[in-house]
């Protein structure tokens, strides 16, 4: 019995060794080599950081802008399903976007599924978000809060807290009836699908944006 077990063990070992050799030869001598090498490199590049910085540097170069002079602003056009990344008046990059399921009109409350309109800025970067990467914008803004207070959607004290956050350049409260946190994230731009009104990008595009702009970057959202 022991001899049989030894024979089987040797047989399995040699089979494994043979399969390993065949696999290595296949990788080295076939087109699969390039694909597998790319996958290895991608797995070593955390959420596309290195690739995204290199790719965006080329876009800056094509636009005649140095990294030192790059002054990012983000412009989102809801009707066109388009995001532009600008430096002053120069377009550096453009990306297709998805928006809230209710595609027309300004955001009035947490449940209307609309993407807000107005002037915002990136107040937080979340590297471990469930939608790949997340750039939180400071919605609701004081304008959103004023509208909500007049319509009695939020209390005056909540409006004051939102306005204070804006003045302090911090993220506003996201537990009011106006909704939040909202922002820009991944998981696809094929349709208008976000239930909270956030802006969605393809993962490769949110990686470019995430690794190349800082908190405080202005975000203008227009119809």
Image (spheres, rainbow, N blue to C red):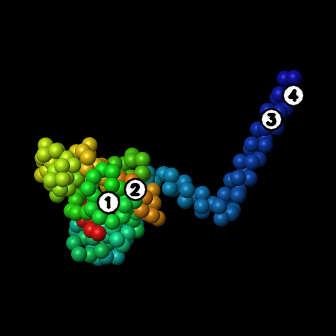
C-alpha gap between disc 4 and disc 2: 62 Å
| Disc ID at residue 115 | 1
Quarter of the view holding residue 49: bottom left
Label 1, label 2: how far apart the Cα atoms are: 9 Å
Q: Residues within 10 Å of mark 2 (few under 14, many from 20)?
A: some
Q: Earlier in the sequence, mark 1 or mark 3?
A: 3
Left or right: 45 as drawn, with respect to 22 = left
Q: Nearer the viewer, mark 2 or mark 3?
A: 2
Q: Residue sitting at 80 percent across and 35 percent down? A: 10
From the viewer's perspective, tell me whether residue 34 is left or right of residue 202.
right
The residue beneath circle 2 is 194
Question: Distance from label 2 to label 3 (Cα)?
Answer: 56 Å
Q: Which residue is mark 3?
A: 10
| Real-space CA distance between mark 1 and mark 3, rounded to the nearest whole angstrom | 64 Å
Which element is circle 4 on? helix
Where is residue 165 shown, x and y percent of the image?
16, 48
| Residue 162 in view in this figure | no
**Residue at point 78% right, 38% down?**
12
Identify the element where label 1 is drawn.
loop
Quarter of the rendering containing residue 147: bottom left
Q: Which label lies toward us, 4 or 1? A: 1
């Amino acid at each position: 019995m022991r001899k049989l077990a030894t024979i089987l063990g040797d047989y399995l070992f040699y089979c494994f060794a043979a399969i390993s050799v065949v696999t290595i030869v296949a990788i080295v001598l076939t087109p699969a080599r390039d694909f597998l090498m790319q996958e290895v490199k991608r797995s070593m590049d955390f959420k596309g950081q290195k690739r995204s910085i290199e790719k965006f540097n080329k876009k800056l170069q094509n636009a005649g802008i140095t990294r030192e002079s790059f002054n990012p602003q983000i412009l989102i056009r809801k009707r066109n399903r388009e995001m532009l990344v600008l430096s002053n008046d120069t377009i550096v990059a453009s990306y297709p976007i998805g928006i809230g399921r209710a595609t027309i009109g300004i955001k009035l409350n947490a449940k209307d599924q609309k993407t807000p309109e107005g002037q915002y800025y990136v107040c937080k970067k979340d590297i471990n978000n469930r939608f790949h990467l997340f750039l939180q914008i400071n919605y609701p803004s004081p304008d959103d809060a004023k509208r909500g207070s007049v319509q009695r959607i939020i209390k005056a004290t909540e409006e004051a807290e939102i306005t204070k956050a804006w003045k302090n350049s911090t993220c506003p409260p996201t537990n009011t009836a106006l909704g939040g946190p909202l922002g820009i994230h991944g998981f696809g731009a094929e349709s208008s699908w976000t239930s909270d009104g956030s802006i969605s990008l393809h993962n490769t595009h949110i990686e470019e944006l995430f690794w190349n702009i800082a908190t405080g970057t202005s975000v203008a959202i227009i119809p």
